[in-house]
Amino acid sequence: MRSLRALAAFSLVTLLAVTTPIHSVSAESVKDVEDEINELEKEKSDLESEKEEAKKKKDDSEEKLESNKKEQNNVESEISSIDEELSQTQSNIADKEGEIEATNQEIASLTNEIEELSNRIDELEEDIVDLEERIEQRDALIKDRLRSIQQNGGEIQYLEVIFGAQNFSEFVSRSTAVNRIMDSDRSIMEEQANDKAQLEDDKGELEASKVTVEENKVAVEENKAALEDQHDELLALQDQLDEQISDKETLLADLEIEYDEMEEVKLSAEEEQQLIDAQAAAKQAALESAQSKKDDLEQKEAEEKARAEAEAERKAEEERQAEEARRAAAESEQEAEQQEEESEEQEQESQPAEEESESEDTSSEEETEQQEEESDVDVQVASGASGEVKSEDAAPSNRSGFIRPTSGPTTSPFDPNRVHPIHGDVRPHNGMDFGQAGEADKVIRAAADGVVAYTGSMSGYGNTVMVTHNINGQEYTTLYAHLDSFTVSNGETVSQGDQIAVMGNTGGSTGVHLHFEIHPGGYKNPVDPAGYLN
């Protein structure tokens, strides 16, 4: 009876001792991965929408740039046309000024001529006065002579004078005197007639000269006034053209500024598009990684399920064998009872034989108890081994959080209201700056596990690396800027502490340093990195 119990106990102990602990894959772990895949799919879809918006922004910028360029060309053409008109106007002004100068010279000449004519008029007036006086004197003399002739008989008296001569010599003298008197009278009359004619001529010349001078003066002054009016009009036109050119140049300058701003918007849109493409590639890599993780977990789950089924079959087989053992033990017990009955019959025959049998039974019981104790120890060892394995499987990974990306000192903190060291205006400083105290500080390392989302040059940032991370279900993007060079590429998986770049001085930088940013939920959500770095 005791031997059968011992056999059953030994079988149970053996079963417990050889049983291997089963570590089944948690269905929740697979679900977490599926949730992660769904979240990545959603983020990838959101990135596609952002990509479309960035493309639309870029297309709008290109359209505005083209329109701005056309307007610039039109303004430049108008400026060129105005320049030509202004040049022609300036040439016309020069011509008019030349004409005005010539007219001024003509006026000066006429003024001199007028002055000469005035002098001539003065002379004529003096001559006229003299002529009038001589004419008046002659008129008086002629009147006296005519009065005398009328009183004395005129030519008869001359004859009396001539014929009253006493001799021929006196006759000749008297004849000569009479002739002289008559010549004198005739000369007086002629001079008087000539002086009167000259007087009339001088008066006519004087009036004509006055009229000519006045007409010429009026004509020249009218011409000068007209030229000055034309000159004033040309000067006004020049001022108008200068104002138009100034307005056009101002417009052109505004258009050029607007063009530069739109060019920057276009570049920003292109960079955003590249960044979105890189993030999409990173999301795809993360998606493929998550899908691979899910496949591995599902495979492990299938393997564990198969192992569990095999273990269940093995246990069922062991139970079947134990049942058979129990049946065999029962049969053995019946045989033992029969043997015991036979032994009791023989007990009376031999007392020493009974004592020997009891001794054997006692030895058997002690052996069974020893085996039971050993079995208990084995069970405890098996249980202890199982717990140790589980403890190893449950060991958590300490890969969460961010580390400093460089060993260099902090040189500039996160500051939304910082005055830009280059531009001099207030511009947000969306990260932390780290300087270089030694050569080792130039090594830039990944702040956490992740996937490289972008490598390239960005406006203001120079050479830049962006890495996306998924930490405790939260997505982050880290940015490393002003790099001398980078050692990773888009889509590459990096571990915390891996070197990804070398500190530099590219982009809008005043010296060798690293500009570091952290963006929870993805790029364009900057926060102070100081609160995230271990």
Image (tube, rainbow, N blue to C red):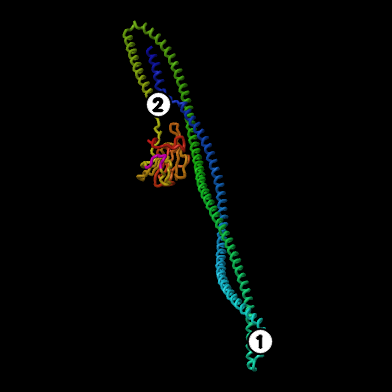
Instruction: Give the residue type at disc 1.
Output: Tyr
As drawn, which residue projects farthest toward the front? 151
In the rendering, at what x and y percent does residue 125 appear? 58, 72
- Residue nearest the observer in this picture, 519 or 179: 179
Point out residue 532 in the picture as x, y percentages from the top left corner: 40, 35
Crowd rating for badge 1 (residues with CA inside 10 Å; few <14, some 14–19, many 20+): many
Say which element carries label 2: helix
**Label disc, if present, on residue 158 of the rendered structure:** 1
Which labelled disc corresponds to residue 36? none
Lower sequence index among marks 1 and 2: 1
Magenta stretch? Answer: 411-418
Density class for disc 2 (Cα within 10 Å; few <14, some 14-19, many ≥20) is few
Horizontal and vertical percent position of residue 165: 64, 92
Please tell me whether mark 1 sits on a helix, a strand or a loop: helix
The residue closer to the viewer here, 348 or 94, is: 94
Identify which amino acid the numbered label 2 is placed on. Lys
Q: CA distance from mark 1 to mark 2?
A: 186 Å
Comparing labels 1 and 2, the label whose residue is closer to the camera: 1
For residue 234, side relative to residue 156 (left or right): left
Determine the image quadrant of residue 91. Answer: bottom right
Res 415 visible: yes
Say whether residue 498 is visible.
no
- Point out which mark residue 390 bears: 2
Whether residue 247 is situated above or below residue 139 in the rendered picture: above
Q: Image height check: is 160 above or below 375?
A: below
